[in-house]
Amino acid sequence: AGVSGNKARKLLKFAVEGPARNASVVASMGGHQSNAMVALAALCHARGVRFLYLAKPVPRWLRRYPCGNYARGLALGVELVPLPVDAYRRCAADGAFRDDLIADLVGWHDDDDDDPGGESPPEDDHDVCATADFSDAAGPRRPGDAALDESGGDSRRRTSVAWVPQGGASGDAELGLRRLARELVDATHDPTSLRVVVPAGTGTTALFLARHLAPHGARVFAVPCATSATGLETQMRALDAATGGHGVLPAVLDRPCPDGEPRYRFGVPSRRDYRVWTELREAGLAVDLLYAPHAWDVLLRTLEADDDDDSSSAGDDVAAALRDATAGPIVYLHCGGIEGVATQLTRYRREGLDVDEFLPDLLAMPGARATDSSNRGTS
């Protein structure tokens, strides 16, 4: 179905077996430029399954000039359901409320609905909700069997809906990540000394890798990118408890920004992130512009810090394990997202950074598309 990167791992079970209970509808939620949205859309499109996607109100400029993953998702048939911000947040935290909402949506969807939530606040669509409900993390389930019939009447019928948690953060992700752990072990001469660094959103990838690499003696380090170190650990513990309670968690690796630098904010254009991304690109590493720069920044500053002057929030032991010169290789797990770089760069351009030297090559990539909406107006 053309799915690649980290989402191909998380959604392997879906790709192999299809949606849970052979559901005729798949539903999920997240940001307008989500990689998970496009991956799910591609799989649903390939299987002829309807895909509902709950999101915050779509900014007027994005509706007018569709670009990036938002445009790709629409082309693949996503039925994007814009919700008022409060309702969206409640869907993330209250499974029963979300289930009732989806049950009402299954039988009909009006593509011409006038912006029910008004204009979106500044783009924070990539945020991973730290209060997410992991009660359904064991895998997709049906949020409600009752739905309006196809004619929109009052008669009810049973309709199977498979819910996929935001970002694919569910027990179903374990299948593909267990396979990835095996590939890492097979590619390493001595897996007992292997150290794997993972940029983390929900922490799903890091959690399941840690679970399946631990028996081989390898260690996994998760860099919190979409939430705080405490929020990431809370999410991973909740997902672990919902998928068997193994109690094996990756180490959380985080460092405060250097003095004088702006506080890191996920999804917000940052000169520091852009500088790191540029250095990585010049070194021959093609990475995304959302997770990778911050993860590499934290990793490199950890490796360069003195043992006696360690400011890692994860503690001296975690930093020392990464700086151990006698240990094996450090493997950075690139999670994909390259196709979204062109769209990200247009946002950086609006912040006044010179990105034009990179855009031509990126726009030449298959499926890449960027729209400069810096003069989009407000209407």
Image (cartoon, helix red, strand yellow):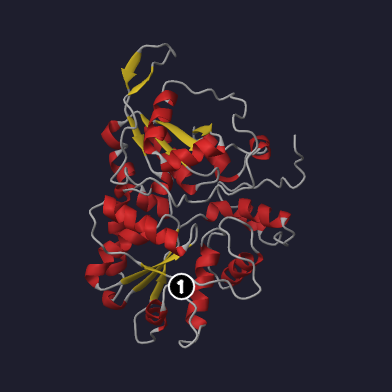
Query: Residue 203: image x %, image y %?
Result: 39, 58
Pick the front one: 72 or 348: 348
Please give left or right for residue 190 compared with residue 100 in the image.
left
- Looking at the rendered structure, the number of numbered marks drawn on it comes to 1
Please give left or right for residue 122 compared with residue 292 in the image.
right
The residue to which callout 1 is attached is 313
How many other residues sit within 10 Å of disc 1, few (<14), some (14-19) or many (≥20)? some
Which of the 4 image quadrants contains residue 307? bottom left
Question: Taking the image as drawn, is residue 345 in sight?
Answer: yes
Please give left or right for residue 307 compared with residue 146 in the image.
right
Name the residue rendered at 53%, 62% in the picture.
287
Image quadrant occupied by the C terminus: top right
Query: Residue 325: image x %, image y %?
Result: 39, 86
From this view, report whether residue 214 is shown above or below residue 133: below
Residue type at mark 1 is: Ser
Query: Residue 165: image x %, image y %?
Result: 39, 43
Name the residue rendered at 56%, 73% in the picture.
283
Name the residue rendered at 53%, 50% in the picture.
126
Which of the 4 image quadrants contains residue 231? bottom left
Name the secondary structure under disc 1.
loop
Image quadrant occupied by the N terminus: top left
Question: Taking the image as drawn, is residue 55 in sight?
Answer: no
Please give left or right for residue 120 compared with residue 10 in the image.
right
Pick the front one: 267 or 93: 93
Query: Residue 205: image x %, image y %?
Result: 37, 58
